[in-house]
Image (spheres, rainbow, N blue to C red):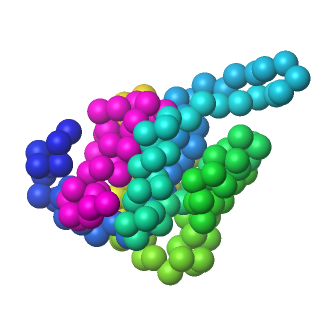
Amino acid sequence: MNPVEFSLGLREKLKRVKLLLLDADGVLTDGTISYLEKHGWFRTYNVYDGYGIKLIQSLGIPVGVISGGNSKDLKERIKLLKIKHSVLGSEDKLKSLEKIVKKTGVPVENICFVADDLFDLPALERVGLAITVPDAVPEVKAMADWVTTRRGGHGAVREVIDAIRKVQKLNP
């Protein structure tokens, strides 16, 4: 959806975003986990999402990751993108959100969380802007403020970042 097509309510929520939080599996990735002998389990990440994350951080909006996973590849991706805020290895996403709120001081009404599964619901219901992807479970799609057109791991994060940038008039 083009940002000019957003409803007034969604545009207002996008304007208020001061922190972008992302789930990993199903959002930063397409949810596929592969195994390579002698190397172990791994996921693939989208380069356009990665560039978007670096870009929005450079424009003053920090990014964080909240994930039930705690894998080496995810930690490396977070390090590579210089993401300063993360809570990994916990399926209690609300508690993870509260840790990041406490650490950053950003009020929940100024947080956008992009997530896709049932255990994400409590945190999605708490933030100012709840976004999900087309492959999300029906319960998440039903309560989200916006469902991206792009799938997780296939540019959904960049779609969200570009919408925030355009609505807030943040230019590189």
Quadrant location, the C terminus: bottom left
Residue 53 among those drawn in magenta: no
Q: Classify residue 69 as left or right of residue 83.
A: right
Tell me: residue 6, above or below residue 168. above
Q: Quadrant of residue 9?
A: bottom left
Q: Quadrant of residue 129?
A: bottom left
- Could you tell me which residue is drawn at 28 percent across and 69 percent down? 16
Give how far across and how far down residue 8 sits, in percent. 11, 58
Q: Decide: is 61 above or below 88.
A: below
Q: Residue furthest front?
A: 172
Look at the picture and state if 141 lies above or below 37: below
Outermost residue to the top: 37
The residue furthest right is 38
In depth, the one of 7 and 142 nearer the eye is 7
Residue at 70% from the left image edge and 47% from the top image edge: 76
State left or right for residue 69 relative to residue 94.
Answer: right
x and y, in percent, of residue 77 in the image: 64, 46
Q: Is residue 31 above or below residue 23?
A: above
| Quarter of the N terminus within the rendering | top left
Front position in the image: 88 or 49: 49
Residue 159 seen in render: yes
Query: Is residue 150 rendered to the left or right of residue 42?
Result: left
Which portion, as a residue range, is magenta? 143-172
Residue at screen point 59% across, 77% down:
103
Q: Position of residue 96 (x, y in %)?
A: 61, 62
Q: Nearer the viewer, residue 51 or 7?
A: 51
The residue drawn where x is 22% and y is 56% is 166
Task: Confirm whether residue 124 shows in the render.
Answer: no
